[in-house]
Amino acid sequence: MADAIDNERSIQALTEDKLGNSDLITDDDFVQVPLDTLASEKIDTPKYSYWGSVAKAFFSNKVTVLMLVLVVFILGMSFIQPLFSGYSLKDVSKINDLGARYNWPSSKYWFGTDQNGQSLFDAIWAGARTSISIGVIGTLITTTIGVIVGGIWGVSKRLDKVMLEVYNVISNVPSLLIIIVLSYTLGSGFWNLIFAMTCTSWLGTAYSIRVYVMMYRDREYNIASKTLGTPTFRVVTRNILPYLTSVIVTSASLSLSGFIDYEVFLSYVGVGLSQNVPSLGRLISTYSPYMTSYPYLFWLPVLTLALLTISLYVVGQNLADASDPRTHM
Amino acid sequence: MQTNPEIVLSLRDVAVTYGEGKNALTAVQHVNFDIHKGETFSLVGESGSGKSTIAKAVLGIHDTSSGVVNFEGAQINGKLPAKQRHALDRKIQMIFQDPAASLNERATVDYIISEGLYNYHLYDSEEDREKKVRQMMAEVGLLPEQLYRYPHEFSGGQRQRIGIARALIMQPDLVVCDEPISALDMSIRAQVLNLLKKFQEEEGLTYLFIAHDLSVVRYISDRIAVIRHGRIVEVAETEELFTHPIHPYTQALLSAVPVPDPQLAQHKQLIVYDPSMHHYETDKPSLVEILPGHFVWCNKAEEAKYRGELAGLAG
Amino acid sequence: MSEESTNKTILKVDDLSVNFQVRGKTLKAIHHVSLDLHDGETLAIVGESGSGKSVLTKTFTGMLEQNGKVVGGTIDYNGTRLTDIKTDKEWVKYRGKELATIFQDPMTSLDPIHTIGSQISEVIVKHQGKSKAEAKKMAIQLMTRTGITDAARRYSDYPFQYSGGMRQRIVIAIALACHPKILICDEPTTALDVTTQAQILDLIRELKNEYKFSMIFITHDLGVVASIADRIAVMYSGRIIEIGTCDEIFYDPRHPYTWSLLSSLPQLATKGDNLYSIPGTPPSLYADIKGDAFAPRNPFALKADFKAEPPMFKISDTHYAQTWLLDPRAPKIEKPKIIQNLHERMEKQMESDFMKRAETEDIADAN
């Protein structure tokens, strides 16, 4: 019965030809075409590039681009404007010039002037420069140490035992307390403050990297690398850390705004930077008595701080999202 | 097969235990088998049977808790000097089940296939390495222009061939194939099996092939071991196992293979295996060579019964 | 195969097309598919991943993902136009009640924090309006019927206490609790072990004879449908490329893709020969496919296959295939050797294999 109807070719008839394709076909088209086995192996899609796709995903979001413009603007102003303004926190030359003091924002003084007759516009950018520097340097240190230690921590059983104890102790002490105590002991100063802030904060980054490394460590592609004789060090650097780009960017963007906020808080309570260094925190703390009398003096630095941290955060988070290959298609 | 074949891998009374103390869980025990040079030896069992555990013990990914694993005459389980371990890693390679999970998504095909070459410096110069990689890609049917593409750009079958390429470029002696086709589409499976066979013929490779389905292994294996609940219940040459399965579990597995024929499928009888049929309380079982080269896990009483049945068949 | 299958059509799919929007691109998942399901029959839909077999059946119960949309064609169930249903509220009248689905992974259909029994009786209370006590009794009956031993005691177990096979039995029990007219089985045995798979297939077959539902059985493995299907539809790249009775598909396949699916069955392979393999992978569904979707992988491709999509050719009243090879002008091409005389070869193989042993045992038992 198997091949019984094989010879009944005559009963075949075209069914209703919805596609209307039979007209396109002539008798000449019924010749066999040799199979090109390689043709079906071809990949039609354009070549994938990781960072190219990150950029594409990143810039496809309008809010992100807007925030990025804001970040670039604030950065540009903070690092260029102070070069020309010559702003110095200690400059009190205009303190007796009553016309120069307490000017509300105007076309001459965009952000107004303070009790010393200093332009708040100059003050804000000089302050922002310090705050951003602290944030960036702190983040670089934290992230670098965190990633290196976390990478080793995740694969070394011996280190894990020690580090877990250290982590448990330190993570149970409020980090702000550690920073304040360290700042007091070390005395004020830019680098002292950075040391105080980064001294323990890398531990958090390292711990989260450790968790991810442990999660990825036993994935099949890493076992595969082991069977190919790849040393553990290269498994971490070549196989695991590239997968953590998005995690690392997230943590960096969080710590960037975090450090800026710390500086503001510390300056507000009067520790951290030296007296002659302007920063957003110092401005906010100096001008807080004027909150009701000359509100622009207080609110404009606060607004700058808010814009800076929010835009940095949004840019950082979207960069983290974009660096996750699941968003590339 | 008649003359004493060279034994590449032999396992004697191997057991693997997970966890320690009270929570210890014995994944496999009493594992005994030899793999001959140039053959394909298949380990067939259902999920949780311990077949992958055995593979990982052979590769040194899992430690054994007792027994001996011998590879090319030297014991390879337990603590090995780092140098010996490293040298061994090259000789025993693995092909993974899931081609999506077993390739580094952030590396190009070039790096993935070269990874082992880098680790053992198996090339003279950068040109030599690239030549080797391109040659390997051609052998597994990938195109040279795909050298710098990433795994996710490939289809499942192509990825599996990348996995085969990176393992075989190491020129291993033994290749552990852990269900290499079960994650692939039906029409792709034949490509991969043919490829494995081609390499075996050309390079004289020895395969330890792991599968959950007897129908798949019949075509490629020389000998088959059936494993259930961490114990090997039957070992025999392929055709022998298909024609004269002795252990009731093997029979159940064979009867479960779908018959791709509508008329015969109607009449197929499913044999259901009931593990409580064995009475091993006093009469302890062991792996008995019931016919030359045909081993069954049974106790004395069962051995007598099986022998009786075999005599009945012969008569 | 059930004898009571009549020719009354219970579900009619006409010229259905489904598109998905994925990141601004259009994926054509289903391309002009027409299909009838007869009352009481089992229709198997066979295809590889991405062939559209699951998407097709999801349209029957309004369970397409958010980004999927029926862009053309109609689905009629027993006089109701399912493609006109807009709201989830309306779908509830059909989904589960008239058309029930069993999925590959039983855990996706079971609630991990409720007991097995309560999940079955809940469905009975909701759909059949029984009292709680009655529902419990019926649930235990259903559990027993689907092969759960000691059902009364296991009624209050949680899903995690069950093995994969037992969970699938429960999912079947839940599906049957509302006496559906059509049972859609979406790869119900793929995630299971071989022996469990065979048992579940047997169970489904028995239950079908008992409950008299029509069934759509989706699978990627032609091997498993031989014992269960009345008719088989083969899908490739969102198209039905061949449809026929189970015998016609196995003994007289006409489409080269069906040939390759059959040929790749490991049960048919003979040692020493190379397996029949087709190169490459299915085409991307994002691209416009010109001509026959299978042409680039088809060793028997004609020039026509690259120029225009072939129409459905009628081979018999029940057997259709979409390939230019069936055009009267096409050269006559034999199907691959490995699937010629399939029945004779399988019969011979089974005789030498374990089945012979089973028979001798029967004789021994009789003595």
Image (tube, coloured by chain):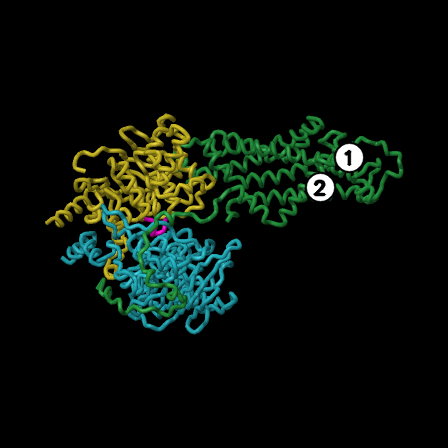
Chain colours: A green, B yellow, C cyan
Q: Secondary structure at mark 2?
A: helix
Q: Is residue B165 visible?
A: yes
Q: Amino acid at mark 2?
A: Leu
Rounded to the nearest angstrom, the CA distance separating label 1 from label 2 is: 20 Å
Q: Amino acid at mark 1?
A: Ser
Q: Is residue B26 visible?
A: no
Where's residue A193, x and y in %? 68, 30
Furthest residue toward front: A28
For the residues bearing labels 1 and 2, Cβ distance under 8 angstroms: no
> Is residue C87 rendered magenta in the image?
no
The N terminus of chain B, quarter of image: top left
Where's residue C37, x and y in %? 37, 68
Q: Is residue A221 left or right of residue A69?
A: left
* Label annotation for residue A85: 1
Examine the rendered structure and indicate whether residue A222 appears above or below residue C266. above
The reply to the same-chain question for discs 1 and 2 is yes
Q: Earlier in the sequence, mark 1 or mark 2?
A: 1
Task: Say which quarter of the image contains residue B93.
Answer: top left
Q: Residue at point 21% right, 52% down?
A: C354
Q: Residue at point 76% right, 43% down?
A: A300
* Label annotation for residue A305: 2
Chain of the residue on which disc 1 is drawn = A
Task: Say which quarter of the image contains residue B82.
Answer: top left
- Mark 1: few/some/many CA within 10 Å (<14, 14-19, 20+): some
- Tell me which segment is drawn in magenta: B184-189
Chain of the residue on which disc 2 is drawn = A
